Image: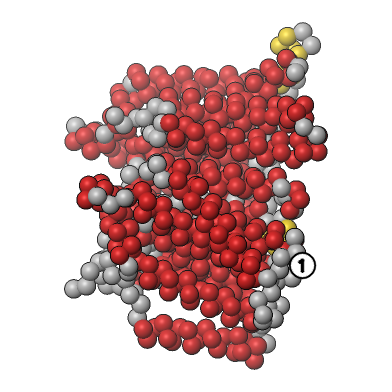
Amino acid sequence: MQSNLHHRFSTIAVIVLLALLAVFPPAASALDQEFYIGVASRLMIFAIAATSLNLVIGFGGMVSLGHAAFFGTGAYTVGILMQHGIVSAWLSWPAAIAVSALLAAVIGLISLRTRGMYFIMITLAFAQMVYYLFISLRAYGGDDGLSLPARSTIGLDLASDSAFYYVVLALLSVSVLMVYRLVNSRFGRVVQAIRENETRMEAIGYPVFRYKLVCFIAGGAMAGLAGALIANQNMLVSPNLIHWTQSGTLMVMVILGGVGYLAGGVLGAVAMLLLEEILSGYTIHWQLGLGLILLAVVMLLPNGLASLFHRRRRADVSREDAK
Amino acid sequence: MDITLLIEHSLNGLQFGLMLFLLAAGLTLVFGIMDLINLAHGSLYMAGAYFAATFNALTGSFWIGMLLAVAATALLGAVLELGVMRRLYGRDHLSQVLATFALIFIFNEGARMLWGAQPLTLNAPPQLAQPVELMPDFFYSSYRLFIIGAGIAVAALLYLVVVKTRIGMMVRAGASNREMAIAMGVNIKLVFTLLFAFGAALCALAGSLLGPILAVQVGMGESILILAFVVVVIGGIGSVRGALVGALLVGIVDTLSRTLLPVTLRLLMPSDIASTLGPALASILIYVLMAAVLFYKPQGLFPARG
C-alpha cells in the first residue's frame, strides 16, 4: 500500500481533462456560446485560489479565514499599477505575487503564534484590516473599487476572451503542478507531518514555525496570482474581493472539494460556481438549493467531493488542528 | 470635546455592547460546550427580528410580539438542534463550517421567500418614543435606555442561572470538561438541546430589541456575526463572563472610535484626509484590539478550560 503522504493524479484523467479544456473555446464559439468562455475562465481562476487555500488548510493544517486578503491584494496590485501606467503583465503579475507573498509573511509571522479557533479569528482580523484599508484608499476607488481600462498586455491579445482563457488555463496547470511537486517533496512531507503531530515534529528538531510560515506564504503568493487574473477577468477591482464572505466562500470551496486532496480546490471551486450558475438560471431562489446541496454533501460525503475518487481514507486532518 | 456628546456615545456603546453580549453568550456556550462552530447563529438573530416584526404587526403590541418572537425562535433553535446540529457534534470543525454556512444560505433565502427582499420596519413601543432628559439640556432616547436596562437584567439573570442553579452547574461542567460531565451522569443531550434553544432565544431578544434601531433585513445576521465571534474570542471560548467583558469592550471601542476618531483626526490633519482615514481606522480598531488581546493572551481574557 502506498504512503498516505503520497498524492498522485491519474495520468489518463489529466490528459483527457486538458484535452477537453483545450478544445472548449473553439467548441463554444462554434455553438455561439462565447459567453461560457468567460465563465470557464472565472471557474479556473477560482480553482487557482481554492487550490492555494487547500495548500494552507489541507496540507499545512492552518485553517485560515483570511485568504481573500491575498487574493484581493493581488488584484489591487494589478489595478493600482495599471492606473500608474504599468500595463505589462510581465511586470504587474509577478508584482502581485510578490506583494501578496510579503503580506502573507507579515500576517503569518504574527498569526502563527496562535492555534485553532484563535488562528481562524486572527487571520480573519487581518483580512478585515486589509479590507478597510482598501476602502479608505479613495485615490483607488474606495468603496466603489477601481475599474481597469483594459486587460494587462502579455504579447497576446488578451482582449479576446479565448486568448485570456488559454493564459488562465496555462497558469492553472502550472499552479496545480507546483502544488503537486510541493506536497510530494521533502518540504511537503514535513509540512504534512507537522499537520499530523506538531509537538512530535518539534521534538525531532524541525523548525516547525518556519515550515508553516513558508507554506502559508506559498499559499498567499498563489492567491495573489489568482487575484491578478480575476482583476483582468472582471476588469474591476473592488473591496468585495477581500470581504470576509469571500474568504468564507474560498474555504467552503476547499471543504466541499476535499480538504487535503490534490484536486480538492479545483473540484470545490468548479462545483460551487457551476451550481451557482446552473441554479440561478432556474430560479431566483437558487441560494436555497445551493444551501440544501451543500448540507447534503456535508452529511453524505464527510471528506468532500474528491473522496469519491479515492478509496483510501485520508488521514483525519482538521480535528486535531482545530482544537 | 463636548462632554454630553461623550456621555451620549458612551451610552450608545454600552447599549451596543450589551446587545452583542446577548449574541455572544449563546455563541460562546454552544462553542465551548458542544464544540460546535455555528456560523448560522447570526441567522437566528435575523429570524428573531423578522418574527418580532411580523408578530408586532399581527398583534399590534411590541411586547407581545417580542415574547412570541423569542418563543418562536427558541422553538426554531430546538428544531435546528434536533434536526441538523446534533449530527455535527462528532464532526471536525471544517465540516461544521460548511454545514452552517449552508444554513446561512437556506435561512437567507427562506427569509427572502417568506418576507420579500424589502427591509421590514419595526417601531419602538409608543411608551418609549420620547427622549428623556437625563441631565439639564441632555436628552437621550428612552428606548435605548430601556435596551441598556434589559441587557443588564438579562446579563444578571444569566449570571444567576449559570452560577446558582443546577442546570447552570451542568452547563459549566460541560464547558470545562465535557467527557467528564457525561461520565458523571449529566443528560448531555437534553442540556445541548435546551442550551441551543436558549441561545436562539437570546438571539431573538437581541434581534427584536435592535429591530427598531437597525433595519430588519436579509443579511443583517452576517455583519453582526463576525463581531460576535470577535467578542467570543476576546473573552475566551466558553466563558460567559469573558463574553460580557469582551462585548462591552468591543461595543464601546467600536462606537466611540466611530464618533471620536474622525473628530480627533480633524484636529491633527487636513479635513479631507481625516474624513477618509477616520471611518477606516475606526472599523479597523476592534480587529487591532482582538489581535492585540490574542497576542498577549492567546486563549482570550478568561479561558474557560483550565
Instruction: Please give the count of numbered marks on the rendered protein.
Output: 1
Query: Residue at left 75%, top 18%?
Result: B1
Q: Chain of mark 1?
A: A
Image location of residue A204, percent across then percent down: 21, 50
Rendered-image quadrant of the C terminus of chain A:
top left
Tell me, yes or no, if residue A243 can be seen here: yes
| A66 lies above or below A186 | above
Residue nearer the viewer, B273 or B49: B273
Q: Which residue is at a point 60% across and 53% down the rendered structure image?
A: A242
Give the secondary structure at mark 1: loop
Residue identified by numbered label 1: A149
- Which quadrant of the figure has residue A230? bottom right
Residue B106 can be seen in this image: no
Left or right, B268 with reference to A64? right
Position above or below: A148 against A125: below
Q: Position of residue A312 (x, y in %)?
A: 25, 70
Residue type, numbered disc 1: Pro
Camera-side residue: A160 or A210?
A210
Q: Quadrant of the N terminus of chain A?
A: bottom left
Indicate the quadrant where residue B128 lies. top right
Give the colour scheme shown.
secondary structure
Q: Is residue A24 above or below residue A294?
A: below
A37 left or right of A200 in image: right
- Nearer the observer, B111 or A290: A290
Q: Is residue B267 above or below residue A233?
A: above
Q: Give how far across and how far down residue A10 sits, in percent.
A: 35, 81
Q: Identify which residue is drawn at 39% across, 22% down.
A: B161
